[in-house]
């Protein structure tokens, strides 16, 4: 799916009709708006249009219609809430329209929806739109499965939920990668001959009607029907038990996360001490850098006269002259046309070649150099002097090797200083999160009560399943005894065997394809993760990112690293669809608060990586500081601004990034 443009009228805080167009050439569309201006409402607009499903949060009691537009109408009139999305999929251009009319009453709380309309149209060769005759919900779900909506219509502040609800996610991944075809075929053929609605069940039923044997006055057909009923009851109870287990796992995961956070809160003092220690280390590195710079200057004055003598002495080797010439070329401003007057000028200005002020020892060293220099310049023949100074020349040549070591040490100190500053910022972010841990205690108590109730319900289902299973096993044993003793049709028996083998082959092929998709998806997520992460100590090649149920690993439950995992997963899905050569590989990525939990470097990585994979990316944010180094290049993005000074009359306009004050 590629979204071309949208139009919304009186939806939530958006007053009147607002329009936007989007490109599909890899550019990012940035939609900027301050807090509370309507970014989340715009994200929910897509969910409302596609699935009639939206979530504004439990504390948001504002109506779907625009309050300002409602107040402008007289009692008895209606206010319109509508939307339009033009999009393309597999070469077909669609237009989705939704309209609601709300009655205006004396009290806005009493307003009710008077009528609504939802329609899908297809653009024809004559450029006009024609009604879609099928089921709209099924068509939308086939293009972008609802189970994947929270991944491609992502709320960055609720990114933790992306690692949960693996059943829905598995179904959506199966649909995207064509695995649902296998599931439908296997469901049609069946794997249980007792299920009458399947192919295997049909032929098993025909077999049963070809025998007159009975047990306890009940025929094979009667026993088969009993077994089918028992089987369905057991499967329903197993499904409910599985739902309870999934819910228990989610509660336990949340409980563990709270314990971890509360435990970390107790070590707040340790984190503050660690920050202080790292700040002290930064000061030490800065002092070390200054000291190394002094060493470079001292080394220069100590080796200066003898290195120059080595260059002009006829006895010097070709290798020595070459090395010294390269050094002189790289420091031309120091060595070119050296004369006594130059060194005298250094003393007069009291500034060393390394940029620092001269100390007494350095002044003495320069004066000593001036004393041994001949009148005029070094173009004078110093054969006799050189002969006496050979040992000092060799020593000076050896000492020049220290330049590279000093430079390397300075670079190492700068890098360590930068790493320490990043670590301090992470610890400051962690302290901020720990300050919000007070509300978690109440949530923990509620989770304990819910876990106890869920465990009780699970135990009840397990007891009932065991009882039904015992009855089922006894009925199936009698049923099989009847089948063995019956004269059955060879034709039906052969068909049963044929479709049983077909079912096995389909399952094997499906398992192989599912494994291939899982491997490809894992590799793609890993590739994206390497581009986004700032954790250089991790060996990403050793990490399994995708679980067996296609859910994302749950190593991190909060913070910037979880956000990196989530974006790696969402972008990795599109990359995997492209590598598997699936037709449906152009789903847009729309994210509200994309940088809610990421640091500056992580945010820049996300901003750079998204256009390389996704043909269409739409980001709703108020945090442009984290990517401001990239915003100077207008070729990277389109820019819109949400204006909403009254909180009830939001509008969307094309904007200029230069008008935004960082």
Image (cartoon, grey):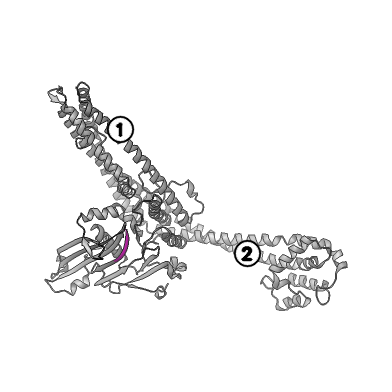
Residue at the extreme top:
485
Main SS of the magenta part reads strand
Residue in the foreground of this view, choosing between 173 and 104: 173
User: The C terminus is located in which quarter?
Assistant: bottom left
Q: Which residues are magenta?
A: 1-5
Residue in the foreground of this view, choosing between 639 and 431: 639
Q: Magenta segment: does it hold 2?
A: yes
Q: Residue at x 66, y 66 (%)?
A: 293
Numbered marks: total: 2
Residue 243: image quadrant is: top left
Q: Say left or right for 295 vs 261.
A: right
Q: Say left or right for 220 vs 124.
A: left
The residue tagged 2 is: 289
Q: Magenta segment: does it hold 559?
A: no
Q: Earlier in the sequence, mark 2 or mark 1?
A: 2
Residue 381 percent location from the top left of the image: 85, 71
Residue 179: image quadrant is: top left
CA gap between label 2 and label 1 equals: 75 Å
The residue tagged 1 is: 501
Residues packed near mark 2 inside 10 Å, few (<14), some (14 to 19) or many (20 plus): many
Residue 55 percent location from the top left of the image: 26, 59
Disc 2 on helix, strand or loop? helix
């Amino acid at each position: 799916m590629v979204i071309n443009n949208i139009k919304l009228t009186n939806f939530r805080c958006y007053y009147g009709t607002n329009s936007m167009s989007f490109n599909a050439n890899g550019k990012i569309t940035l939609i900027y708006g301050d807090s509370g201006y309507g970014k989340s409402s715009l994200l929910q607009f897509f969910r409302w249009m596609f699935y009639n499903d939206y979530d504004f949060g439990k504390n948001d009691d504002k109506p779907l219609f625009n309050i300002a537009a409602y107040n402008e109408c007289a009692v008895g009139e209606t206010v319109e809430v509508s939307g339009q999305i033009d999009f393309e999929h597999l070469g077909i251009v669609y237009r989705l329209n939704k309209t609601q009319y709300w009655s205006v009453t004396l009290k806005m709380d009493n307003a009710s929806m008077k009528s609504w309309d939802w329609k899908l149209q297809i653009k024809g060769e004559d450029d006009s739109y024609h009604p879609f005759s099928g089921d709209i919900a099924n068509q939308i779900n086939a293009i972008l499965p609802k189970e994947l909506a929270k991944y491609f219509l992502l709320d960055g502040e609720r990114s933790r939920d992306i690692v949960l609800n693996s059943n829905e996610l598995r179904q959506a991944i199966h649909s995207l990668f064509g695995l649902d075809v296998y599931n439908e075929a296997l469901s049609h053929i069946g794997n249980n001959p007792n299920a009458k609605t399947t192919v295997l069940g049909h032929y098993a039923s025909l077999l049963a009607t070809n025998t007159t044997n009975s047990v306890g006055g009940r025929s094979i057909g009667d026993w088969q029907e009993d077994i089918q009923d028992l089987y369905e009851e057991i499967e329903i109870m197993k499904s409910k038990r599985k739902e309870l287990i999934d819910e228990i796992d989610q509660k336990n995961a949340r409980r563990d996360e709270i314990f971890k956070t509360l435990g970390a809160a107790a070590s707040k003092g340790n984190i503050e001490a660690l920050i202080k220690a790292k700040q002290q280390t930064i000061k030490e590195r800065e002092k070390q850098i200054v000291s190394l710079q002094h060493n470079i200057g001292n080394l220069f004055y100590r080796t200066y006269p003898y290195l120059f003598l080595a260059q002009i002495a006829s006895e010097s080797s070709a290798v020595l002259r070459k090395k010294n010439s390269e050094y002189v070329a790289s420091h031309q401003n120091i060595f070119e046309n050296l004369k006594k007057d130059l060194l005298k000028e250094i003393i007069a200005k009291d500034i060393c070649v390394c940029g620092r002020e001269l100390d007494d020892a350095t002044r003495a060293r320069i004066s000593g150099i001036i004393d041994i220099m001949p009148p005029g310049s070094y173009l004078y023949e110093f054969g006799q002097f050189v002969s006496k100074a050979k040992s000092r020349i060799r020593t000076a040549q050896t000492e020049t090797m220290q330049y590279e070591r000093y430079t390397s040490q300075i670079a190492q100190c700068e890098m360590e200083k930068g790493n320490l500053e990043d670590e301090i910022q992470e610890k400051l972010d962690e302290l901020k999160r720990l300050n919000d841990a007070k509300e978690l205690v109440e949530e923990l108590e509620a989770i304990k009560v819910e876990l106890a109730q869920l465990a009780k319900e699970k135990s009840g289902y397990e007891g009932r399943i065991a009882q039904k299973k015992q009855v089922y096993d006894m009925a199936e044993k009698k049923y099989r005894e009847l089948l063995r003793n019956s004269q059955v049709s060879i034709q039906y028996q052969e068909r049963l065997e044929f479709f049983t083998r077909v079912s096995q082959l389909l399952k094997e092929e499906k398992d192989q394809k599912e494994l291939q998709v899982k491997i490809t998806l894992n590799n793609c997520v890993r590739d994206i993760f390497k581009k986004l992460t700032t954790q250089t100590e991790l060996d990403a090649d050793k990490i399994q990112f995708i679980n067996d149920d296609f859910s994302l690993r749950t190593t991190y439950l909060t913070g910037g690293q979880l956000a990196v995992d989530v974006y790696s997963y969402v972008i990795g899905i599109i990359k995997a669809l492209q590598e598997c050569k699936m037709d449906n590989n152009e789903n847009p990525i729309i994210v509200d608060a994309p940088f809610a939990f990421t640091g500056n470097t992580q945010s820049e990585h996300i901003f750079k990586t998204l256009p390389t994979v996704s043909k269409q990316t739409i980001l709703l944010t108020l945090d442009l500081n984290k990517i401001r180094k990239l915003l100077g290049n207008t070729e990277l993005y389109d820019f819109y601004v949400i204006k909403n000074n009254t909180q009830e009359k939001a509008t969307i306009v094309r904007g200029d990034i230069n008008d935004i004050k960082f």
